[in-house]
Image (cartoon, rainbow, N blue to C red):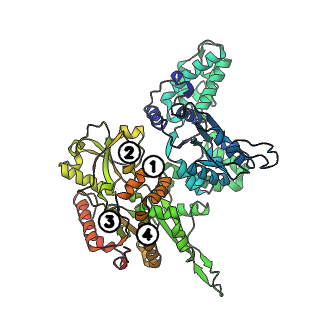
Amino acid sequence: MLTNFNNHTDSPRLVDPASLAFQSLLDKFAPTDATVLIVGETGTGKEVVARYLHHHSQRRHGPFLAVNCGALTESLAEAELFGHEKGAFTGATQSHPGWFESAQGGTLLLDEIGELNPSLQVKLLRVLQEREITRVGSRKAIKVDVRVIAATHVDLAQAIRERRFREDLFYRLNIAVVPLPPLRQRREDIPLLAQHFLALYARRLGRPARRLSHDALEALREYSWPGNIRELENTLHNAVLLSREETLTPAQLRLAGYSEHGFNESNDSTLDSFLQQQLISQPQQLFDRVISGLISNALLMTDQNQTQAAALLGISRHTLRTHLANQGVIKGRRKALVSPSSSSAHLTQERELRIGYQKFGNLGVLKARQSLEHCFAQQGVSVLWSEFPAGPQLLYALQNNEIDFGTTGEVPPIFAQASGNAVTYIAWEPPAPSSVGIVVPHDSDIRTISDLRSKRVSVNRGSNVHWLLLQLLEEAGIGLDELKVVYTPPKYPLTASDYLSVDAWMMWDPLLSAAESNPELRILVNGEGRVRNHQFYLARRDYVEKNDDILRQLVESLQQTGLFIDSHRHEASMLLAQELGLEVASVERALTRRSHKTRGMAFEVIKEQQTIADRFYALGLINKPVRVRDAVWQFSSALALIE
């Protein structure tokens, strides 16, 4: 990673491909005003990256300020961030601008954002949404023109599960993410970084140039660097300061655990010794700490996939979820509650509706308006929302009883049904073929569908765009074995590594609509005349059997929301744009391309779904035939359609 972004001509030119791709990513983010979230271990250079983004942006002539959120005192944190008026509190003898006002026209780094207390998280979310602050002791809003960059070493996803960090603030910050890999994962960069620091501190200290012996360089490569680049810098600074020789040896680096025979693990560092020490010092907390640590690391290594994490730990998924419930990470099973309205205080059962959604369409707007929660509040039904990147992932969660209801395109439920998922079709929305397409770089040599032959195409397996890809290949007479299909979840914006790994991306709205506005990308074709691209609402079969009243009310709410979107499209676009981190114009264009009238399942739609299912089976993409009509809700055809 570059180490001196204020004077980048002095920085080492790194050779590790991951580092080169990383700098390319920064160069894409820097010119924009997008909020950036920098995630990395302590010492990886998060502030240095933030300064690079600032100095390569249009705000380079404005101020760059950095505030450590973890160091803000709870009593004065709001005043420090947003400023205060005279007399606002004891000791406020005069008005004072806060960090946001001081950074006007420039960039503000909120370092260690994960340490910000919950009450300030609410206020920060409003500042990011409205771009205005209110000083403590004042009612007057002040507009601020500040680019916010946040940084943290905390696992914010885990912090959300532990109720220490707001989910809505996370999504507001999580627009452009810069993951900083630890130094132990970039060992190819160590020689160049070391050379840079040696030259830097020799010059600063007025010492002759220093160089590393072969053994010293190998010692640097082999060391684990728990303190990352900061530890490497301090190690070499200390070596230049104390050494009298031109060539530095391993002994002069003073690396922990190093001897003339190399790095040795001491007995105290073994697992048994560690556990014995902990049993002596903190026996009461050890079991819970070990279990919690094992589970959190397994989930981290599997991207929070509970089934894979359980397999990694050698336990069942049920056992894993029991531990997660005990830790308060997930809710336990439904409990019997005393009904306050009953004079006899008989027991009733609290009910839940767990909805999986993607931040778009009727469900996205329904969540943003929170009208469903209001609707069910008097019925004792709690509504829980879970976001998913695409339909296949959502239906996997449905199959594993993590959600009860969700919406996808036309292909995911077919794959789900073929895999034994007890999915049930509840309702559908009219097709929107122009909302799916294939995207290529603007200067790509791919000009027609036929040019896809031998190219690498990214597609989310089992998604609606997977069906479009098959149609495109058939249209061009290209076999599946004549190109490289890369199965990956959808994403936008694209990173430098994305451009290097594939040649084209299958996308759908609103990502497709956002890509249309990007001058670096080009829409090769969309789904017009090729696919219908219906949208379906689906539920677990056992949930349908027990909660048909909830589903009827839910569909009615979706119908009402569809009317709202069609009659207040700009307002709906603004709601979704805030959630998605996309431009309002892109979201509005995406909403315009589709109808939002939720309807009960019809014979014609079931027939079209069956055609798709038969095609996937014929191509060997699903392992058994499916009968779509077997998965249709029996009340679906009776649903009233609001015109």
Q: Is residue 402 visible to us here?
A: no
Closer mark to the observer between disc 4 and disc 1: 1
Q: Nearer the viewer, residue 28 or 134?
A: 134
Q: Nearer the viewer, residue 429 or 266?
A: 429
Mark 2 vs 1, N-terminal side = 2
Pinpoint residue 90: horizontal percent, then vertical percent: 82, 48
Q: Which residue is mark 4?
A: 558
Q: Which residue is mark 3?
A: 430
What's the amino acid at mark 2?
Ser
Pinpoint residue 379: horizontal percent, then vertical percent: 55, 77
Q: Which residue is mark 2?
A: 517
Q: Nearer the viewer, residue 613 or 169?
A: 169
| Residue 641 located left or right of residue 532 | right
Pinpoint residue 111: horizontal percent, then vertical percent: 62, 41
- Looking at the image, residue 140 lies above or below residue 403: above
> Which residue is found at the position 39% from the left and 68% from the top?
538
Q: Which residue is mark 1?
A: 583
SS label for mark 2 = loop
Residue 163 lies in quadrant: bottom right
Q: Is residue 89 visible to us here?
A: yes
Contact, mark 4 vs mark 1 (Cβ under 8 Å): no
What's the amino acid at mark 3?
Pro
